[in-house]
Image (cartoon, grey):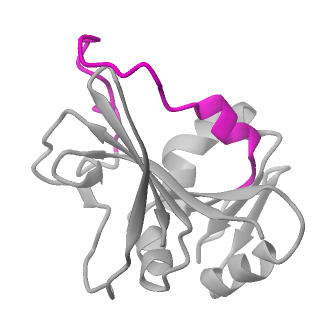
Amino acid sequence: MRKLILNLAISLDGFISDDNGKFDWIVGHADKSKDTKETFDFPGFMKDIDTIVMGSKAYEDVVLSNLDTYEDKKIIVATTRVLEKRKNVEFFSGDICSQILELRKHKGNNIWLYGGAVLTDAFIKANLVDKYVIGIIPTILGSGRLLFKGNYKKIDLHLDQVTVNDGITMLIYSRR
């Protein structure tokens, strides 16, 4: 069965964007002295993905300006708003968790849960995320959009991999 993989970056204090929805703080610290030999293989990750699920803010903030990067992927945007239609983009306004559960039954590659926070929260609460790929950025923002909203039932995870590149620690967990 296809896996739903949450892959995103957070500040050390757990924010996925600043108060204005910006991501310009997602950078390393220009010091390779603590880098691990093994690094996270983002191109390999992308090769194993054929569908990206995201909220409308993530779509507007990041993807609209980089659609060419994702042209070979199906993009599902969870939104109640009417947005400009694109070739490989589908807008969905119903029960997105049920929609993705149904999609996982069909043949294909894995599904990237791209964000944002509200959408991600629904999948975490439903315990539907198979793998968590979290990049911890060496920054404390102090405020912004939190990744983990709280009020979850306990979810046990297994640490599969830890890598460090330019001060960014990548933690990869799978659901036990």
Work out whether 35 lies above or below 44: above
Q: Nearer the viewer, residue 110 or 120?
A: 110
Q: Residue at x 63, y 80 (%)?
A: 96
Quick check: can you spot residue 84? no
Residue 77: image quadrant is bottom right
Percent across and percent down for residue 11 are 24, 44
149 relative position to 127: left or right:
left
Percent across and percent down for residue 49 are 73, 49
Q: Residue at x 34, y 49 (%)?
A: 21
Count of labels in the image = 0
Pick out the residue farthest to the left.
142
Residue 31 within the segment the image draws in magenta: yes
Quick check: can you spot residue 46? yes
Pick out the residue farthest to the right.
107
Q: Nearer the viewer, residue 170 or 58?
A: 170
Percent across and percent down for residue 123 are 50, 76
Residue 95 within the segment the image draws in magenta: no
120 relative position to 92: left or right:
left
109 relative position to 35: left or right:
right
Work out whether 101 lies above or below 8: below
Residue 158: image quadrant is bottom left
Q: Residue at x 83, y 41 (%)?
A: 72
Q: Which residues are magenta?
A: 22-51
Residue 157: image quadrant is bottom left
> Predominant secondary structure in magenta?
loop
Q: Residue at x 33, y 88 (%)?
A: 153
Q: Quadrant of the N terminus?
A: bottom right
Q: Nearer the viewer, residue 164 or 56?
A: 164
